[in-house]
Every structure is written in C-alpha cells, then in structure tokens.
Image (cartoon, helix red, strand yellow):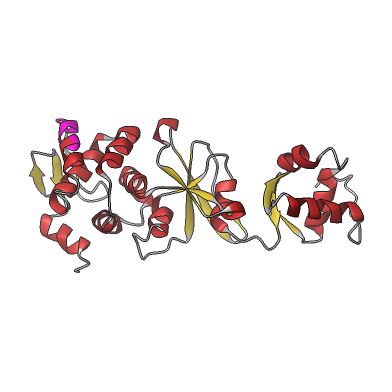
Amino acid sequence: MARSTYLSANLTQPQIDLLLMLDDHELNIFSLETVKKTMGKKFSNVSELVENLVHKKILSRIERGKFCKANFHNENVIGCFLVDDGAIAYWSALNKHGLTEQFPNTIFIQTTKLKPAKTVFGTKYQFIKIAKPKRAGIIQEGFGNNQYAMTDVEKTIVDCFDLPQYSGGYAELLRAFHQADLNPSKLITYCKAVDNTAVTKRMGLLAEMLKPEQLNLFIEFAKKEVNQKYNLFDPTGKDEGEFVNAWRLRLNIDRTRILNIVNKQY
C-alpha cells in the first residue's frame, strides 16, 4: 500500500459503488489492472478504493496487484490466477481426476513462467516451469469465477512420467496409469509434445503389460521411439533388475511387483 493512500474509517459511497460494479461484472477474483481497464473511467482512484476495501477486509490481497472477495476460497482458481498460464497439474491433477486417493498438501501448478513457491491463505502452491512446446492438453474445470485450467487425464499421466517427483510416488503413478481410461491418440500427441524418449518407453512397456488392446496404437508408436540407450524403468529406483531388450529398459521393479502394485497388493 502506498504511504499516501488515505484509509477511511467507514465505507464511502465510491467504495460501495466499486463493490456494486464488481458484482455487476461478476468479478470475485481480479487484477488491479483489469479493474482499472474496466472501471477506471468511472473512478479516478481505483487503487485507493481497493486498498481501503482490503483494509476493511471486504477484499483480500492474493499478491501484489491481485485480489479477490474476502469470502472467495477456491484454491484451484487462486493458484492458476497467480500465473498467466497456470494449470492444475501433476499430483494435484491426478487427485482431481480421481486417479489417486492420496491428497497432496501442496497444489502443483504447471506454467511456462518462472515463479517461486508461495503460500496464499494457508494453501501452499508450487509452480513447475515447462517449455512452451510441452504446454498441451489443457481443459477447463468449473464455471464462471470458479473456472480454472487443468491438464486432462492423458496429459497428466504423461507429465507425471516426465517429472515423477511431482506425482506422489511411482507406485501411485503406476496405479493411476492402470486405472485411467486412456486415449491412445492423445498419449501419442502428448508424448511428442513432452519429447522424452525414456518416458515413452516406460509407458509403452506398461501399456503392453496392462492394456495391450486398448492402447495398441500407442504401443506401436512407442516401439518406433525406442533408442539404443537403456533407461531404468523407475528413474527413482536402484540400478538393478532385468534388461528388457525390446524396450531398452532395465526393469528395476519386476513384473510381478508391478502387477501387485497396480492391483493394490502389498
């Protein structure tokens, strides 16, 4: 807040008028820039009016220049609003898609922007920066002020294999792959976008083991992507296990163990 900002003791008529206009435009979450563009002609001091409403706890500051109504609590919308192209992704998206029972204590936001992790209204957000070509498979969830972006099922799966440290654990990811109703054409599109051969090989082997008929098209694609380099099936695991020549993978989780994991047998 600027030092020169005047804070009124009570609601003034301009403050009331601004609140009414926010209601008219159905703005429960907004940037100061948007309000100035939308309503600046009717108010000469939008910044001061907003600061007064924050001081009176009618509005809440999300971060510098971004605000919401004090009773607005949609943490997914707020997280995506923190960056221009934010989308719920990775473990958070797995949970939203019903592919994991585990609930992350951090909301993962995928973005092409660099932004440090932060906590807003008690919710922790971590921002995962990706290259622009990897941004694909974005869908919209919710309606109106409660609408937010999220990766679709197939992109969520591919992203989690690409960066498994944000998936909630490799066992959870294997179960999610097994449970999900996956579209092979989308998997191919997203694997091309992510451009990680090891990921394609791992998913190809899994598809061949678990869903050979449903994902036959993807399996054919994945086999053509196999290179000469051997990769660990679980990149977070030990360098041990069976060498699978067809996929150039070292199966450091054996086949029986994989089947037990996806069927929740421990």
Q: Looking at the rendering, which quadrant does residue 185 occupy? A: top left
- Out of 223 and 3, give the one closest to the viewer: 223
Q: Is residue 204 above or below residue 59?
A: above
**Image-based side of 80 in relation to 244, left or right:** right
Queried whether the magenta region covers residue 225, the answer comes back as yes
Q: Residue at x 57, y 42 (%)?
A: 83
Can residue 63 be seen by looking at this rendering? Answer: no
The front one of 20 and 253 is 20
Find the residue positioned furthest to the bottom.
266
Measured from the top left, where is residue 255 in percent x and y?
A: 11, 55
Q: Going 45% across and 31% down the picture, which residue do you hit?
A: 132
The quadrant holding residue 12 is bottom right
Instruction: Return the residue nearer the eye: 13 or 117.
Output: 13
Q: Position of residue 65 (x, y in %)?
A: 71, 44
**Which residues are the magenta region?**
221-228
Does the magenta-highlighted stretch encompass residue 266? no
Q: Quadrant of the C terminus?
A: bottom left
Tally of numbered discs: 0
* Dominant SS type (magenta): helix
Q: Horizontal and vertical percent for residue 139?
A: 45, 46
- In the rendered view, tell whether residue 206 sits above or below residue 266: above
- Left/right placement of residue 1 relative to residue 98 reads right
Asked whether the viewer can see residue 131, the reply is yes
Whole-percent x and y of residue 88?
47, 50
Tell me: 123 left or right of 5. left
Relative to 95, is 188 above or below?
A: above
